[in-house]
Image (spheres, coloured by chain):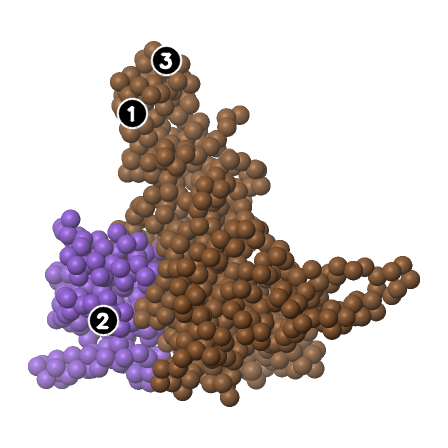
Chain colours: A purple, B brown
Amino acid sequence: MSNWFQEHFSRRKFLGGTGAVAATALLSESARQAEAAEKEPQVRSGEQTIKLKVNGKVHEVKVEPRTTLLDVLRYQLDLTGAKPVSIDGSSGASTVIVDGKPVTASTTLALAVEGKAIQTVESLAGKKLDPVPQCFVEHDAEQCGFCTPGFVVAVRAYLDKNPNATEEMIRNNLNGNICRCGTYVNVLQAAVAVVKGGGNG
Amino acid sequence: MAEYSWPSKEDSRLIGKRHTRLDGLAKSTGAARYTYDVNLPNQLIVKALGSPHAHCKVMSVDVSAAEKTPGVVHVHVLRMPKKGDDGVMVYPEIQTEGELIVAVAAESEGAAAEGVSKIKVQYEQLPVFADDDDLDAAIKAGRTKRAGGKITLEKEPGDDEDEEEFEEKEIARLFKESAHVVEGHYGIDVITHCCLEPHGSTVEWKGGKLNAYLSTQNVSKTDDGFAAALDLTADDVDVHCEYIGGGFGSKFRPDYWGIAAAEISKATGRPVKFMLTRDQELKIAGNRPSGYINVKLGADKDGVVQIWDSQQWGTSGYDGGGVSDSVIPYVYRPKNYRRVATSIAVNADPQRAWRAPNHPQACAMTQTAYDDLAAKMQVDSLDIFLKNLANIEARQTAEVYTEELKLAAQLMDWKAKWHPHGKGPRKGSVVDGLGIGLHEWGGVANSSSVLLRVHADGGVSSYCGTQDLGTGTRTVCAIVLAETFGLDIDDVKVNIGHSTYPESGASGGSTTVGAVSESHRRAATDALARLFEKVAPALGAQPGDLEAKKGRIQVKGSPSKSLSWKEACSKLGMSTIEITTNYERGNKTNLSSEGVGGVQMAHVSVDLETGAVRVNKVVAVQDMGLIINRKAAESQIYGAVIMSIAYALFEQRIMDPKTGAFLNAELSDYKLPRLGDIGEIVVEMYEPESQRSRGVIGLGEPPVISGGAAISNAVCNATGVRVPVLPLTPQRVLKALG
Ligand code: FES
């Protein structure tokens, strides 16, 4: 780990943010531990090539220890749906799904998600459009749209776990994302519509 | 010249209906490419070092270690000490924390940031003043300037009277004769624009020309901005912005970091991406001035204000400034008033236009005093707000405000919920209350040109150098074209977001929807007239007898005598209809006008033990002339209301008063509302035919104005005490409760 990394991504910065941020840091930590247990312990430094499984496809990417998942997605895989908004992940704009859980790609190191299934917003627009983006469109849940992909993924991940969520539950639980334009009313309507089976046609 | 008009309500197939936005899917699936998302082959990433001090001189800059950092390609010093013409060293003075000093271009984000961390700069710290809410301290520090004011009195001095003496005496007399006198202090802190896509650009300098992907709300004119700074002409600069991640008034120029990106691209021969970091975005890319005010008002026995006397102050940064006194008191304007404004210079970045400049602050600084009058008289605030409509100065009429207040009261169930200030029922430690605010705005259409093509194969395409700030501009253009041609929205191809397209005004002042509605309706009307000329012989009719309806060109009222759109266009033969139409701002037409009002009411709960305020419900009634896309118009109002909840309860720039450090310049600390913080929001368009017939009027700004006052008044109604300064944080609520 370079000095730069230690200076700029101090443990305090990682853990001092929102719950989501702390969870991400712990996730990368435990991922690394699991990996260390499996393989010979090794020190990783400098640029190296690793394999990342993104949206069902395995990609070879070049990373340094400090490289975030967000930078890999955006600069190497041309997946620019996840957005760089806050260094600490508190906006949720870089939300992606890793092994079924929502994490902010801006606070996740690429090395920490080697071997895991990474799903980005782009996967929801595959052959069949996912009901979440569909309902976002129907309920006009995007103004400038910069927060929207992160919000779409957060809603998808939450409804995957809570397919019958009530409006109240959605209000109480989808608080990891910031929208400066104020699309929350529309996002709420969209999420409720998904639960009701909207967006399938 | 042709007369342009809108179809009647009955004849409108698309206008005024609910449409999903054309780019909704691209935005919701990550396909939309913002400036930040444009990655050009072989590009460099730039990160910059900002000043750690709010006021200092740059004494030396050492970039040698940064240049040696692996991956760093180029270092560009923005503020270098150098010898002046007289041979004396000039050390750049920095007036705001975060001002950029050195930019580092590297192969990756990580390398650029590492390069930045290796830069060594020596500063000489200078005295800082950062206290914008303390007028006495500012006067003592010599940081104030007179910033306008006005006295208007019904009575005039006699010929032999000294004017100033007369004014003092007359004001004293008016207060003496007032049945009710209220004295209060109110205010609203600096907030930042906090665009989720930070300011920045991806640029490429090639063959003496500049290709710039810029996050901007001013596509047509930022080419000039680049050109002027880089010694080019505007036709050597192409600016592109298909999508912008928020602007709110802060993204009109290339900015000095945009110019730096271009210079680095020129120096390295490579494309360059230079986006601000989050803390830089908050520190140096736009903020809204603060405003604080001491008010004394006098009212007659009915609660109609007869005299207003106020002294205000605030800051817009190191140049001073603050909230313009011209909008004080806001909407309400008694026949007698005196207002005085003082500007304070603090060591912070200068303001930028923030959604409805001056109005939200003015509303929160003055309509709170009107509500305190209701509190003092222990009468219903709604009565006071209605009665005082006798004296207003606004771009909407008292009649419309009266109707809107009544409508809002119904939707809020005001009568059933209202109680005298501080006298409501208490559930545990929680009390609730109601508040009102009302606003006004211009919203005139900006200048706009469009190039429209109708092809012989039936294709329709338009090109306009406007931008879509999130209002749904693209969709508005398509609705207007499709409505005029009798086509579906998907049948027309709308192109915006490039400076090479015909010029269209910047998106500021709620001027865009009016602008593009004007230009696109005009162009489509003209194109249709040309098409009718070509088609008329085939239908055995005069061009003037034709109409475009449901995908056909037909003889008016006789659908049997018709051609499909495609067949009709085929009569163009080898030619294409190509029309460039220009609408000039200020040109009075049937298609657009200006001047709107609106009313908002808030219902809140306040926990007296914790000081937490919760918005239960906001009702927003808004007039806006003719609505083009109802769904997008509603979204604008929802968003604006949420933004007003943001500045009413959460967001503020917290500056250390000693050092001028912006202490909360990250999104974890710069509090913004989230999904769970907004309560119920009810949006109601006020649109009798008398409004619709005014044509299109911009809507982006007005609904963000009065929510702050409404929420503050609701908190006062709930608790019986005024929390003077917005945002109403729990600490401030507790302090006010004492
Ligand atoms: S739509 Fe602009 S930030 Fe959410």
Residue B502 placement (x, y as % from top left): 46, 38
> Where does label 1 land, which residue?
B552
What is the chain letter for disc 2? A
Q: Which mark is residue A169?
A: 2
Using the image, determine if residue B45 lies above or below residue B218: below
Q: Which mark is residue B392?
A: none
Q: Residue at x 43, y 65 (%)?
A: B414
Q: Residue at x 45, y 64 (%)?
A: B601
Q: Which residue is mark 3?
A: B541
Q: Within 10 Å of the Cα at label 1, are there few (<14), some (14-19), or many (20+) other Cα atoms? A: many
Q: Amino acid at mark 1?
A: Arg
- Marks 1 and 3: in contact by CB < 8 Å? no
Tell if the residue under mark 1 belongs to the same chain as the one under mark 2. Answer: no
Q: Report in which chain the residue with disc 3 lies.
A: B
| Element carrying mark 3 | loop
Determine the CA span between mark 3 and mark 1. Answer: 15 Å
User: As rendered, which of B302 and A194 lies closer to the eye?
Assistant: B302
